[in-house]
């Protein structure tokens, strides 16, 4: 599903290139649960952003579902967001002015899903996440864990084939973090959704099927966890 | 989606109360100004357009040539002969009519009598204007000399009903007239308005000198319609030499031309025979002012939304990652500004309704909001759309262009330095405009005070006048005797026109030592009896006033100093001049009086003895008594002598003040708009300083921890804003100087612009701006640094 070939990313400052990613090549198949790990400044988030087409690599080739997406125009990229990619953020990034239900409904609106189907899908997701009672609350009325659940619900409602999560549990206490990880695992196993997360936590990474270790912009290690389990 | 956007916009409005308040109040004021402008412009634009043939109706105007064969002046009055000639010689003319200026006419239905605005006109006037008839037949309504056409309002006032066909009325206490038609009241924006219309034949019967064909007495208006498809340019070429052909003259050279009726009101000022503005200038000025206020309010909206951009940027980033396209974001932001505009419009309409009466008084118009008129709704709709889009476009396109990664990573720093600059530019625009208006107001105010204080050449205090009419002609001497005896007045005179307003001039004066071209010199003229100098308080530099008992004084004149100078008379007193074909002797020379526009240089003036030509009685009140008692006494005695006419005593100082009403209106307008501009700009500045203080909370905290004082921080936060205001001052002061200089140059007598005005304005603006920003800065500086720092 994802093919990265020789991805490079650097910022040129006064003629000095400061590299963030170097020679990153990997491929991720549909249904994988990948954790990207590494120390601060290793380029994890940049890699995830490139995967999410939020940033462009300086060099290299990136194919998403067989399509070259390095210099995709904005309209096509938005099409991909609407149909294939769900984002989950460390800071949740819910829209403060929208209620829980409206936050979840928003991607469907942009996808131009009919009103009736929107209603049923939102209801369905709310039900699955046990949040029916909270649907009319605003984000600032929820706890962090609940906000992240809404964030994931919002990423899921458009039925993406891949979820990109940037330290999804970074702001959460461990019981809530575990709950989110369980959820990811379930989604990965039951619905075959590809999940790529950036994390600092070995525990979180253990939920996945594969770990990419980054150090100074280079993939140091590519571990498959299947054998471990 | 739109519903959701709408809901979010509403929540945003409610959540950011201060920003919403600033935006809505600013926009409401701006929109109110614009709505007022729309009403005013449509009122002025529709002047005289209400008639079916408005587009084909013309007024005859004349270009008068001076001695040097250049157009000296342009007039809108014609001789009484030219209408008939045009009708006969020019097949293009469909209908043509003479019409007189409106004057107060006394109409009496038994004891019920009123003075109303009346005009005389030829019967064809009723074919030029298709008045809406309520009763009667317009086709023949003015055929008989004793016929009268009433407006519905006049009919109701006199008879209590409009169904008064063939009822009799006493006209001017002189003749019986019969109502031949009642028409609907004329709209207030009609140039040739009247309350009653009489036949021209009656005018001729009552004033025999009107019958005499006279090509050189330009006293009447001539209106006509041209047949469809007539080329006006060609027509004007054809009639150009009409006056020269029919009345060749050495002292007057005039070229007639047709001028469209619909342009009459807005473009009525001519310079060298070319249109040189008129009322349109005021419409324009007002338009610019109103639009500028709106733009200032829109700038507030832009500035406050971009100041909040950090917060909004996050929203943009999220929405983009869940699939929002740029256009959907743009439409969302526009929706927000449109919603805000909508709320503001509602408030604006209320504001307009509240201020319309005052405004109508100010610009002497009768504006009102016609809620039933779909055109108004379209206008308002377009205004909302325009404002919403102007105000919303910058934030919409600026915010929607954010890159999601940058916004989500909280590094909007890349663009914020630019946005700060742009915001400052906008603030400069706002304050620049405010500075311009303040300087303009101050200078206009000075000029106005200067014109008010400029010596008139006569003593205007305690001077009153009333119309010379009815029995007062025969019993003038009795009136004078009784009034003087009563002690109410100390002096009294009669004259052909009011001393407060230029109303008559002529050419063709001859004197010894003149050149041939001097015949074309235009001279202001007043006819009078005795005591003119004493009553009005003129200053004689030579000679004397007309004296009773001196038989030779029946053909005497007095000249103004300017006249003496222009005529080149060495020893004016005792000289003989030929004035209106009569040889007259100069007995006195008086210091110039301000008769016409106080800002314009006076024409030469002549005061001639002729008590038979009198329209006005002027009286000097006895200042030993209470002025009110004096006026009451005058009323009492006048009513006894002339019982059929209502008494109408007017103070000259008020009439003189009327003359600079236009300038006074401009001062009031620019004062008002200047105040609004400052107010709205300061609202915006207040909002911006609040956000800036909020944004820099951390910086302030750090500085305080490092030992900065409160004053130091207030200075730091305020300086940025004061800097922008200083830039605005620097830019707009020269602009103001140039603009006001050219405005002043329109006056022959004007002040020079002093540097004090600029200093005053500068200090005022800086102080206001400082007060506005320092409040927020002070609040931020007083905060506990721990609160500021613990959130990172």
Image: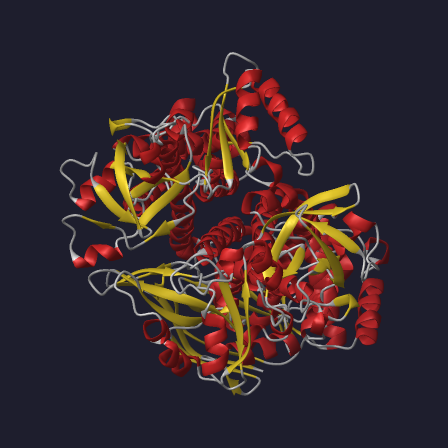
Most foreground residue, A130 or B567: B567
Q: Position of residue B517 (x, y in %)?
A: 19, 58
Could you say where residue A201 lies in the image, as x and y percent from the top left?
59, 55
Q: Nearer the viewer, residue B706 or B783?
A: B783
Seen in the picture, residue A95 relative to B88 is either above or below; the reply is above
Q: Residue at x 65, y 59 (%)?
A: B197
Pick the front one: B534 or A221: B534
B576 and A193: which one is in front?
B576
Q: Is residue A94 visible?
A: no
Residue located at (47% from left, 50% from top): B289
Q: Quadrant of residue B216?
A: bottom left
Question: Compared with residue B681, is residue A212 higher up or lower down, i.e. above or below?
Answer: below
> Can I make out residue B470 in this image?
yes
Q: Is residue B548 above or below residue B182?
A: above
According to the image, what is the colour scheme of the structure? secondary structure
Q: Give percent across and percent down for residue B525.
A: 36, 45
Q: How many marks?
A: 0
Question: In the figure, is residue B469 to the left or right of B600?
Answer: right
Q: Examine the rendered structure and indicate whether residue B767 appears above or below residue B315.
A: above
* Residue B710 percent across, percent down from the top left: 43, 23
Q: Quadrant of residue B231?
A: bottom left
| Quadrant into which the N terminus of chain B falls | bottom right
């Amino acid at each position: 599903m994802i093919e990265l070939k020789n991805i490079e990313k650097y910022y040129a400052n006064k003629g000095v290139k400061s590299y963030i990613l170097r020679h990153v090549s990997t491929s991720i198949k549909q249904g994988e649960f990948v954790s990207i790990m590494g120390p601060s400044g290793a380029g994890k988030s940049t890699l995830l952003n490139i995967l999410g087409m939020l940033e462009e690599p300086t060099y290299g080739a990136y194919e998403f579902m067989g399509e070259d997406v390095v210099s995709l125009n904005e309209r096509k990229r938005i099409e991909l967001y609407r149909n294939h990619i769900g984002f989950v953020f460390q800071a949740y990034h819910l829209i403060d002015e929208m209620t829980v239900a409206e936050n979840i409904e928003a991607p469907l609106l942009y996808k131009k899903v009919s009103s009736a189907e929107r209603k049923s899908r939102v209801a369905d997701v709310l039900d699955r996440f046990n949040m029916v009672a909270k649907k009319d609350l605003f984000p600032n009325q929820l706890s962090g864990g609940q906000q992240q659940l809404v964030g994931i619900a919002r990423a899921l409602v458009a039925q993406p084939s891949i979820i990109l999560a940037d330290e999804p549990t970074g702001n959460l206490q461990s019981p809530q973090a575990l709950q989110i990880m369980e959820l990811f695992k379930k989604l990965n196993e039951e619905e075959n959704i590809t999940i790529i997360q950036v994390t600092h936590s070995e525990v979180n990474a253990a939920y996945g099927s594969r770990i990419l270790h980054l150090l100074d912009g280079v993939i140091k290690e590519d571990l498959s966890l299947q054998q471990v389990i | 989606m739109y519903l959701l956007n709408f809901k979010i916009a509403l929540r945003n409005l409610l959540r950011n109360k201060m920003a919403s308040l600033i935006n809505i109040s600013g926009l409401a004021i701006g929109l109110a100004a614009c709505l007022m402008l729309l009403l005013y412009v449509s009122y002025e634009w529709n002047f005289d357009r209400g008639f079916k043939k408005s587009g084909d109706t013309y007024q005859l105007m004349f270009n008068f040539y001076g001695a040097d064969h250049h157009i000296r002046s342009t007039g809108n009055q014609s001789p009484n002969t030219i209408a008939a000639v045009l009708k006969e010689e020019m097949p293009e003319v469909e209908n043509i009519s003479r019409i007189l200026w409106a004057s107060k006419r006394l109409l009496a239905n038994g004891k019920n009598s009123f003075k109303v605005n009346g005009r005389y006109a030829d019967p064809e006037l009723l074919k030029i204007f298709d008045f809406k008839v309520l009763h009667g037949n317009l086709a023949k309504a003015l055929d008989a000399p004793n016929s009268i056409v009433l407006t519905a309002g006049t009919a109701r006032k006199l008879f209590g009903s409009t169904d008064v066909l063939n009822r009799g009325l006493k006209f001017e206490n002189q003749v019986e007239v019969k109502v031949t038609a009642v028409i609907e009241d004329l709209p207030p924006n009609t140039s040739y308005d009247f309350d009653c219309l009489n036949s021209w034949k009656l005018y001729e019967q009552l004033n025999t000198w009107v019958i005499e064909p006279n090509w050189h007495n330009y006293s009447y208006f001539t209106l006509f319609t041209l047949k469809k498809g007539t080329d006006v340019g060609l027509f004007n070429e054809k009639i150009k030499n009409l006056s020269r052909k029919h009345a060749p003259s050495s002292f007057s050279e005039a070229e007639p031309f047709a001028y469209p009726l619909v342009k009459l009101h807005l473009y009525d000022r001519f310079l060298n025979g070319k249109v040189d503005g008129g009322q349109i200038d005021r419409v324009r000025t007002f338009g610019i002012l109103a639009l500028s206020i709106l733009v200032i309010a829109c700038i507030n909206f832009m500035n406050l939304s971009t100041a909040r951009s950090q917060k909004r940027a996050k929203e943009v980033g999220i929405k983009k990652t869940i699939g929002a396209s740029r256009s959907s974001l743009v439409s969302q932001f526009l929706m927000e500004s449109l919603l805000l505009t909508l709320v503001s419009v509602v408030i604006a309409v209320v504001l307009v309704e509240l201020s319309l009466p005052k405004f109508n008084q100010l610009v002497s118009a009768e504006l009102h909001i016609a809620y039933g008129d779909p055109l108004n709704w379209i206008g308002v709709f377009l205004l909302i759309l325009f404002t919403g889009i102007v105000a919303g476009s910058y934030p919409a396109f600026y915010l929607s262009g954010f890159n999601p990664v940058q916004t989500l990573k909280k590094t909007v720093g890349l663009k914020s330095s630019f946005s700060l600059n742009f915001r400052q530019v906008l603030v400069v625009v706002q304050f620049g405009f405010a500075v311009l208006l303040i300087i303009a107001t101050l200078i206009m105010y000075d000029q106005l005070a200067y014109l008010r204080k400029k010596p008139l050449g006569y003593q205007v205090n305690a001077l009153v006048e009333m119309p010379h009419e009815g029995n007062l002609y025969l019993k003038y001497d009795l009136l004078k005797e009784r009034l003087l005896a009563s002690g109410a007045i100390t002096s009294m005179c009669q004259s052909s026109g009011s001393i407060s307003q230029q109303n008559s001039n002529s050419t063709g004066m001859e004197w010894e030592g003149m050149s041939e071209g001097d015949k074309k010199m235009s001279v202001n003229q007043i006819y009078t009896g005795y005591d003119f100098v004493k009553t009005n308080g003129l200053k004689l530099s030579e000679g004397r006033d007309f004296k009773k008992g001196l038989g030779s004084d029946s053909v005497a004149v007095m000249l103004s100093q300017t006249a003496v100078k222009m005529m080149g008379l060495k020893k004016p007193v005792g000289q003989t001049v030929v004035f209106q074909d009569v040889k007259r002797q100069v007995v006195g020379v008086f210091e110039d009086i301000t008769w016409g526009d106080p800002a314009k240089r006076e024409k030469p003036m002549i005061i001639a003895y002729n008590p038979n030509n009198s329209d006005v009685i002027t009286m000097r009140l006895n200042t030993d008594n209470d002025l009110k008692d004096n006026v009451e006494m005058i009323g009492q005695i006048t009513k006894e002598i002339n019982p059929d006419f209502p008494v109408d005593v007017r103070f000259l100082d008020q009439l003189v003040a009327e003359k600079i009403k236009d300038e006074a209106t401009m001062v009031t307008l620019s004062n008002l708009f200047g105040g609004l501009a400052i107010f709205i700009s300061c609202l915006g500045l207040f909002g911006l300083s609040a956000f800036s203080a909020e944004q820099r909370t951390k910086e302030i905290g750090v500085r305080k921890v490092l030992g900065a004082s409160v004053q130091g921080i207030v200075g730091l936060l305020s300086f940025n804003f004061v800097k922008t205001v200083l830039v605005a001052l620097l830019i707009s002061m020269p602009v103001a100087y140039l603009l006001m200089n050219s405005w002043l140059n329109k006056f022959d007598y004007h002040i020079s612009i002093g540097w004090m005005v600029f200093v005053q304005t500068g200090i005022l603006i800086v102080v206001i701006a400082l007060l506005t920003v320092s409040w927020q800065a002070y609040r931020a500086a007083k905060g506990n640094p721990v609160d500021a720092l613990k959130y990172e």
